[in-house]
């Protein structure tokens, strides 16, 4: 884009430094627009804009924060490896925006994408768990988000358990993650299903084995969950129904894919 090659980014970055809502909103919106063009991303990423966008996200208006999130998402999805690190202090406002937005929205997809990135660092994981309702927000995205949001949310939760199972396992279980994960093993994309099975394996009472969840282990997890819900007396019946529901979902999705293929 000619405006970038003409040197428009440095002045916009300077405007981001001014802590007034109008200026930060205008400059965030302008950088958002420029960041949607792939060829502009390296220039913007190396300009110092990401640090200031996080600042806008933390202290600016709601609209400025929304634009900052989308711009950070654009910059983080560059074909080249992003040449910047995101400050983990962005996590609390990201969680708060995720709580407020529609769970099936494109914005939720962008927010969960960024939170999955943060879950890869110790600072990010600490922020996710220290924010009130941080893990719950991710669990709710696994339950009610779009397929893309589910994928990133379960990825973030899996990163927590992979880093330190003993610390995060109970926190995730306490937010009621099991039903959404079980459903995701039937409804999600193949990679999302693998992530859900791996996380379910981490959430078991015994430490997980190195291989992914097998059918027998999945049945055991469903049974343990059924015991927790309905007690020993009804556990077998409840587990059987849950597994039947999952199989039915898989069959419906397979038929739907076949129908799509036959119509093309």
Image: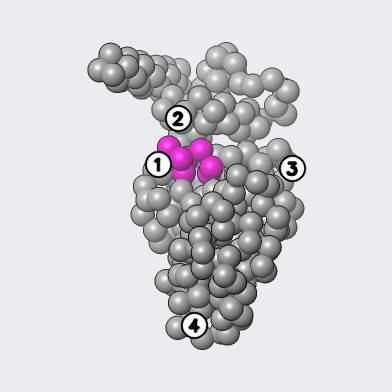
Whether residue 227 is visible to the viewer of this picture, yes or no, is no
**Mark closer to the chain start, 3 or 4:** 4
Which percent across, then down, holds residue 252? 32, 19
Q: Which mark is residue 164?
A: 3
Question: SS of the residue at dot 3?
Answer: loop
Please tell me how crowded label 1 is: few (under 14), some (14-19), or many (20+) other residues with Cα within 10 Å. Answer: some
Question: SS of the residue at dot 1?
Answer: loop
Q: CA distance from mark 2 to mark 3?
A: 25 Å
**Mark closer to the chain start, 2 or 1:** 1
* Residue shown at 66% from the left, 41% from the top: 159
Determine whether label 2 and label 4 are within 8 Å by CB: no
Predominant secondary structure, magenta span: helix
Q: CA distance from mark 2 to mark 1?
A: 10 Å
Examine the rendered structure and indicate whether residue 116 appears above or below residue 239: below
- Using residue 17 as the reference point, say whether residue 163 is left or right of it: right
Please tell me how crowded label 4 is: few (under 14), some (14-19), or many (20+) other residues with Cα within 10 Å. Answer: some
**Mark closer to the chain start, 2 or 4:** 4
Label 4, on which residue?
A: 23
Place residue 90 in its image quadrant.
Answer: bottom right
Which percent across, then down, holds residue 9? 58, 71
Q: CA distance from mark 3 to mark 4?
A: 42 Å
Q: Which mark is residue 260?
A: none
Label 1, on which residue?
A: 146
Label 2, on which residue?
A: 188
Q: Nearer the viewer, mark 3 or mark 4?
A: 4
Q: Which residues are magenta?
A: 147-153
**Mark closer to the chain start, 3 or 1:** 1
Whether residue 260 is visible to the viewer of this picture, yes or no, is yes
Please tell me how crowded label 3 is: few (under 14), some (14-19), or many (20+) other residues with Cα within 10 Å. Answer: few
Determine whether label 3 and label 4 are within 8 Å by CB: no
């Amino acid at each position: 884009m000619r405006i970038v090659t003409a040197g428009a980014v440095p002045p916009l970055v300077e405007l981001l430094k001014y802590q007034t809502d109008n200026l930060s909103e205008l400059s965030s919106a302008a950088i958002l627009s420029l960041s949607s063009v792939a060829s502009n991303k390296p220039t913007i990423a190396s300009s110092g804009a990401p640090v200031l966008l996080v600042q806008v996200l933390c202290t600016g208006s709601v609209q400025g924060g929304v634009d900052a999130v989308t711009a950070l998402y654009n910059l983080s999805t560059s074909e080249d490896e992003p040449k910047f690190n995101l400050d983990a202090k962005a996590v609390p406002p990201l969680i708060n925006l995720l709580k407020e937005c529609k769970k099936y929205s494109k914005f939720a997809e962008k927010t969960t994408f960024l939170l999955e990135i943060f879950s890869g660092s110790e600072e990010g994981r600490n922020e996710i768990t220290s924010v009130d309702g941080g893990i719950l927000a991710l669990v709710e995205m696994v339950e009610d988000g779009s397929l893309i949001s589910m994928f990133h949310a379960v990825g973030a939760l899996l990163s927590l358990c992979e880093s330190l199972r003993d610390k995060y396992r109970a926190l995730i279980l306490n937010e009621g993650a099991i039903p959404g994960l079980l459903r995701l093993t039937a409804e999600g994309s193949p990679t999302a299903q693998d992530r859900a099975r791996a996380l379910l394996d981490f959430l078991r009472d015994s430490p997980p084995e190195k291989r992914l969840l097998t059918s027998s282990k999945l049945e055991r997890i469903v049974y343990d969950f059924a015991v927790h819900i309905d007690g020993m007396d009804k556990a077998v019946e409840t587990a059987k129904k849950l597994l039947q529901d999952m199989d039915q979902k898989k069959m419906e999705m397979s038929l739907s894919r076949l129908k799509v293929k036959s119509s093309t």
